[in-house]
Amino acid sequence: MTLLKVKPLGAIGEVGRSAVLLEAEGKRILLDYGIKLRPKQSPLYPPEVEDVDAVLLTHAHLDHSGALPLLFRGKNSPKVYGLDITRDFVELLLYDSIKVAKKRGYTIGYGPQEIKKLMKNYRPIEYGVPFKIGPVEVIPFDSGHIPGSTMFYVRTNGTSLLYTGDFKLRNTRLSRGAERDLPEVDLLITECTYSQREHPSRKGQEKLLREVVRDTINRGGLAIIAGFAIARLNEIAMILSSGGIKNLYLDGMARAGTEILLSYPHRLRDDKEFEFSLRNLRMVGNWKFRESIIRRPSIVLTTSGMLEGGPVYFYLEKRREDPVSSLTLTGYQIEGTEGRRLLQEGEIYIDGERRTIEMRVNQLDFSSHVGRSGLFEFIRAVEPKQVIPIHGEETEKFGEEVQELVGVDVISPSLEEEITVSG
Ligand SMILES: [Zn+2]
Ligand SMILES: [Zn+2]
């Protein structure tokens, strides 16, 4: 009896374009529908899908949500299920994508109209509260990646699957680690971004961050901290605030991200600690303010995380030749980004102009993904009958390792290959 069909539309051997099509009992359900962002080029899209009934959205990052508006062209209007806070983050990021596309001169196939229609069809769900799409039962669980991020448990006719989206097992300052108390799973579709790497200890990274910032200020420099707009820079603000480091400035899209976090205190691991960090944080919204900040030793938290644009360029231009100032990158720098170029070559291109950077440059790891040993730990705890690894550059290699070390059956499908799952 054919119960459940699964077809990956992206994220095979790559980080990006997370999109899986499920077919069960005549329902067509998408697990995420994301794009692959490419430095200096238009994004890569997953294949078009017709007659989608519903989308289960794990979180707002564009590699999971960026293609959603395409589902709302013409008369189509599938329901999109996700957490309340995810809705606000998605809206922010999708409108920003239109701006970015215009600025860089490529088309993205949708406009504000499609985003509005998507928002109208968004259905907020709650962790641990089951809901149904026709006869298909769905239970959302916290995935611990960013506030609101979700893993989806899907069950139909006695066959079940768990789609992790992006997840993290350990607590961060903003989020609790992923839910461990899960029902029995036949098929586990798991991310494996860091399947070949462990993260350094969080405590150690926090200590290093505070040291770099204190040292920069003591020497009279500007401490620039670059990070993603959604959650990451707030995590950094909490680390610095809890270490007694005061007077932080927040610039770029992270300001809007902060407003959203503030509207959903119940989505945060510790809303008091978050609010404490806000008391220490001033929002930077205009050029006059920016000019005044760089006149004295200051700490600026700003976008973009991989130096692909945003107000970080302003601060870099002003202080790049100043050896007592510092730039701290707080996450992984993808191949082809200016952040990666800086780490490898010591220079970057700002608006086409080559710029050498003489300030101190540090890279720290505040990843919100599970590391290698955590992936194995999770798979062992879930005890699925089968595993499909996605969302990693080494999906196939990791699959072989899981098969060998955990002894579970692994399927490594190629792109758009349909897999039939039975209970
Ligand atoms: Zn993510
Ligand atoms: Zn992702």
Image (cartoon, rainbow, N blue to C red):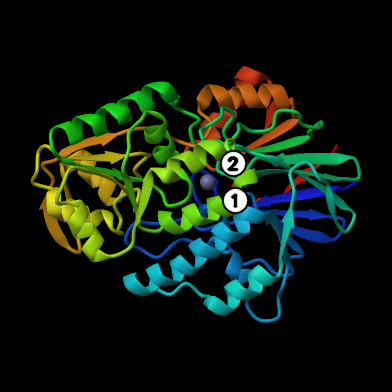
- Viewer-proximal residue among 115 and 327: 327
Q: Which residue is mark 2?
A: 268
Asked if the residue at label 1 sits under 8 Å from ligand 1, the reply is yes
Q: Nearer the viewer, residue 284 or 391?
A: 284
Q: Quadrant of residue 80?
A: bottom right
Mark 1 is surrounded, within 10 Å at the Cα level, by few (under 14), some (14 to 19) or many (20 or more) other residues, namely many
Query: Which residue is farthest front?
Result: 279
- Residue 55: x and y, percent? 70, 59
Judged from the image, the secondary structure of the residue bearing numbered disc 1 is loop
Q: Is residue 248 visible?
A: yes
Between discs 1 and 2, the one toward the N terminus:
1
Q: The C terminus appears in which quarter of the rendering? A: top right
| Residue 177: image location, x then y, percent | 60, 31
Q: Residues within 10 Å of mark 2 (few under 14, many from 20)?
A: some
Amino acid type, mark 1 = His
Residue 114, quarter of the rendered image:
bottom right
Kindly state the secondary structure of the residue where label 2 is placed: loop
> Residue under circle 1?
59
Tag in front: 1 or 2: 2
Q: Quadrant of residue 24?
A: bottom right
Mark 1–mark 2 distance (CA, rounded to whole Å)? 15 Å
Callout 2 amino acid: Leu
Residue 406 drawn above or below residue 105:
above
